[in-house]
Image (spheres, rainbow, N blue to C red):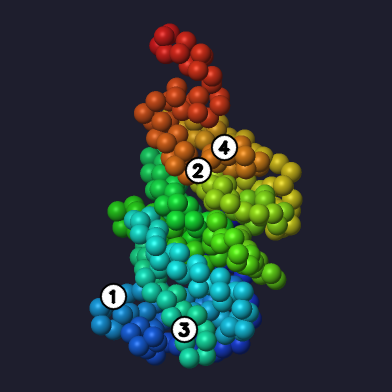
Amino acid sequence: MSSKRTKLGIGDHHPKRTSPPNELVGHVILDRYHVEEELGHGAMGVVYRGRHTKLARDVAIKVMHDHLVHERTLVERFRREAQVAGRLHHPNVVGVIDVGELPDKRQVMVMELARGESLASIMERPMPRSRLVKLVAQLLQGLDHAHAAGLVHRDLKPENVIVEDGDVARIVDFGIAVLREPEANSERLTDTGMIVGTPLYMAPEQAKDEAVDHRADLYALGVIMYEIIAGQPPFLGSPMDVALAKIREELPELPALPDGAKLLGPFMRKLAARDRDRRFASAHEALTTLQLIDSDPYAASVALGIMDVARALDTIKLS
């Protein structure tokens, strides 16, 4: 298992900060959120744990870095993402509940606070097949909801999944998400000069700096599945080595799987096909196929392209 992970799910890129660490801790911002502690920081901003002073509700607060407030495109993207993410209301997604601006023009995004263990931490222990399937199904449901709202995560990784009590997987940090269908007359909002995504989990098209759609999130989930099953990421080496391997190669074959898990290998490889046109067309399609693996393995085999309809019918007649 790779040890090169943070545990906060805030991103792997930590830019130099120009504001003092923990400067907001102990203060009330937006007239209603008491900032209690810093949780971590990433490319776009600092994340704090806070509490709504009137509702007594714990929240996560993302505050944009002060050195980015003059980057008009980034500020606009931050605002638009917050507005769209505010439409996300799903048990498997951590949604945005409020937005605002500090007196120094830093943008603020207030989110639900997910309580639990990160998937990155859980993956360090053996995971039963039933739990793996349950968590993957929940992540597909969360992605399906976000994709339907027009959001693509672009940095889905184990650190960005919190598993709450009761084994409920929740996707966090849509902080570098992009809108799938930008307005025709709007500028394309880019991340010029910023690291977007995490090399281990980013799709080949991200590594090539091509346009990204919802299927990049499916690729990342396929890589996560591989890592859980194999105990290590599919590609090892420096970030450049990993990026080049993804561009040139399909995911490696998994070691021998037990009979009850054999179809998970082809399923995972379809999620993470190098050519995005060979991946599942949507998270919903992937979820339907995953459910078929247990309920109707012959139909699942056909959906995965490893058995044609005629052969499946013959197999059923002989069984």
Q: Name which quarter of the figure residue 85 lies in.
A: bottom left
In three-dimensional space, the C-alpha distance between marks 3 and 4, rounded to whole angstroms, equals 42 Å
Amino acid, disc 4: Lys
In three-dimensional space, the C-alpha distance between marks 1 and 4, rounded to whole angstroms, equals 41 Å
Label placed on residue 101: 3
Give the side of residue 48 with respect to residue 203, left or right.
left
Q: Position of residue 45 (x, y in %)?
A: 54, 76
- Say which label, 1 or 3, has the lower sequence index: 1
Callout 2: few (<14), some (14-19), or many (20+) C-alpha neighbours within 10 Å? some
**Disc count in the image?**
4
Q: Nearer the viewer, residue 38 or 44?
A: 44
Q: Name which quarter of the figure residue 71 lies in.
A: bottom right
Residue on which disc 1 sits: 57
Callout 1: few (<14), some (14-19), or many (20+) C-alpha neighbours within 10 Å? few
Give the number of the mark in front: 1 or 3.
3
Residue on which disc 2 sits: 282
